[in-house]
Every structure is written in C-alpha cells, then in structure tokens.
Image (cartoon, rainbow, N blue to C red):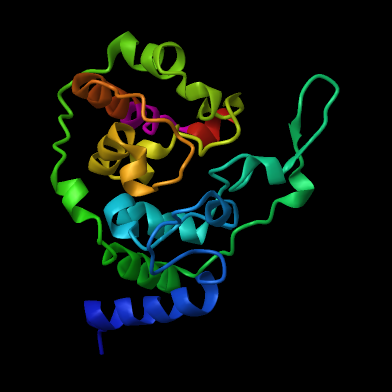
C-alpha cells in the first residue's frame, strides 16, 4: 500500500527528532543573543521549507558534502599555519548519510517548515536579469562576499558556506531576501547588511544560479 504524503512527512518528522535534533534547531526561534548563536552546532532547520530546494535536500542527505569549509563557527575549527590560519580538519565531523527512503521522508518533512513565508512571498525572482561580468565583480569586489564565501572549490573565504552550489541548494526568493536583510532571518548573524540595490541582488542571485550549473565534481 502506497504511503500518503502526510505519512511520509510523519516518518520524516520522527527521523528529524531522533537523528537531527541534537545538532539542528527544528522549532525556532532564531537565537537573539551572541552567546546563543555561538552555541549553534549546525544550521537552523525550523524554516527549512522557506530556505531549501526539496530535491536538493533529498539528494544531499544521501551523499552529504561539506558546505561550510570551516564548520559552523570558524573560530572553533582553525589552527595556526606557516603563513595564515588553516582549517583544522580533525575538529570537523561528517554529516550522517540517509537511505533514499529516509532522505525522501526527511526532505518532505522539512519542506513543510515555512514559518517565514511572508519574507519569501515579498520577493520576486527575475531569472531574466543577466548577471553578466558584474555578477562576479559585485560578489568579489563591490560587496566583499568572497571574504567569507567560496565561489569555487578552494577559492574564497572559509568562514561562511560556499556559494557555488547555492543556486541548486537554496530557493531564489530566500537568497534575495537573505541578501536584502540577513538579520530578518537570523537577528544576531554576523553577515552584514550591505543595503544592496534590488537590481544588484537579482544579479547576484542569478550569478549563484549560474555557478550551480557547473559540474564542480568533475573540476575537483
């Protein structure tokens, strides 16, 4: 007998509670003090349905790859190097892998978590806005995003999540909203609000969408 969507999501909720809740916040709200945010072990998932593409979640959970080169909080995972601080890989842990059935159930359950949908509904992604050469220049030079984020494996900052897969990982409306005002999503997050003009936000999002179309596995 085929399972209904609600039954699958119910199974996913059980898996989340049993295997994910020790690291991920599944209920919210986001931390409102620096002390609380420094204690965060992994990304909050209580608004995962507003943030992530469901198909990506399902695929990633079956074959997880590190998104944050230096873990959740950079200062906990670095060591002195000859020329600069380096990531101490021995302090990082691998994410658990799920079976296809469990990954599908968890992705279904996470997709239902949409408490921030008013922020999503306020955005309108325009895929027709070409990033052109300015897309990378804005990301690198004008707004300094590469200080924290990698735009290809090994190229860029280490303290934030890489963005070369962001276009397949994140909903475009979420990217628009988060760039526009990071603190609307995460009040104490250290990502600055650069007050980026709307057309520039569209270009940056479409630049990341284009990046995600590259076969990065073949290039590593």
Residue 105 spot, x, y in % from top left: 36, 72
Q: In the image, what residue occupies the spot 27% across and 54% down?
A: 50
Quarter of the image with the N terminus in it: bottom left
Relative placement, left or right, of 206 versus 57 is: left
Q: Is residue 211 magenta?
A: yes
Closest to the observer: 69 or 32? Answer: 32
Q: Residue furthest right?
A: 82
108 above or below 73?
below
Residue 45: image quadrant is: bottom left
| Residue 200, position as x, y percentages in the image | 25, 19
Q: Residue at x 53, y 52 (%)?
A: 37
Q: Residue at x 49, y 61 (%)?
A: 62
Q: Is residue 214 left or right of residue 38?
A: left
Which corner quadrant holds the C terminus?
top right
Observer-nearest of 133 and 220: 133
Q: Is residue 77 left or right of residue 217?
A: right
Residue 69 image offset from top left, x and y in percent: 61, 39
Q: Judge whether 6 appears above or below 54 on screen.
A: below
Which segment did they paint magenta?
A: 208-215
């Amino acid at each position: 007998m085929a399972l209904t969507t609600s039954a699958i999501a119910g199974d996913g909720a059980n898996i989340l509670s049993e295997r994910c809740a020790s690291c991920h916040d599944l209920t919210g709200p986001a931390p409102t003090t620096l002390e609380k945010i420094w204690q965060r072990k992994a990304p909050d998932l209580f608004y995962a349905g507003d943030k992530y593409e469901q198909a990506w979640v399902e695929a990633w959970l079956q074959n997880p790859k590190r998104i944050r080169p230096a873990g959740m909080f950079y200062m906990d995972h670095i060591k002195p190097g000859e020329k600069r601080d380096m990531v101490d890989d021995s302090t990082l842990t691998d994410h658990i892998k799920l079976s296809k059935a469990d990954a599908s159930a968890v992705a279904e359950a996470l997709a239902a978590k949409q408490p921030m949908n008013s922020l999503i509904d306020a955005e309108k992604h325009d895929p027709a806005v070409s990033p052109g050469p300015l897309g990378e220049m804005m990301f690198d030079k004008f707004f300094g995003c590469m200080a924290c984020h990698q735009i290809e494996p090994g190229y860029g900052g280490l303290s934030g999540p890489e963005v070369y897969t962001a276009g397949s990982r994140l909903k475009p409306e979420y990217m628009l909203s988060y760039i526009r005002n990071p603190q609307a999503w995460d009040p104490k997050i250290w990502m600055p609000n650069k007050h980026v003009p709307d057309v520039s936000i569209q270009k940056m999002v479409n630049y990341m969408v284009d990046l995600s179309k590259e076969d990065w596995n073949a290039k590593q």
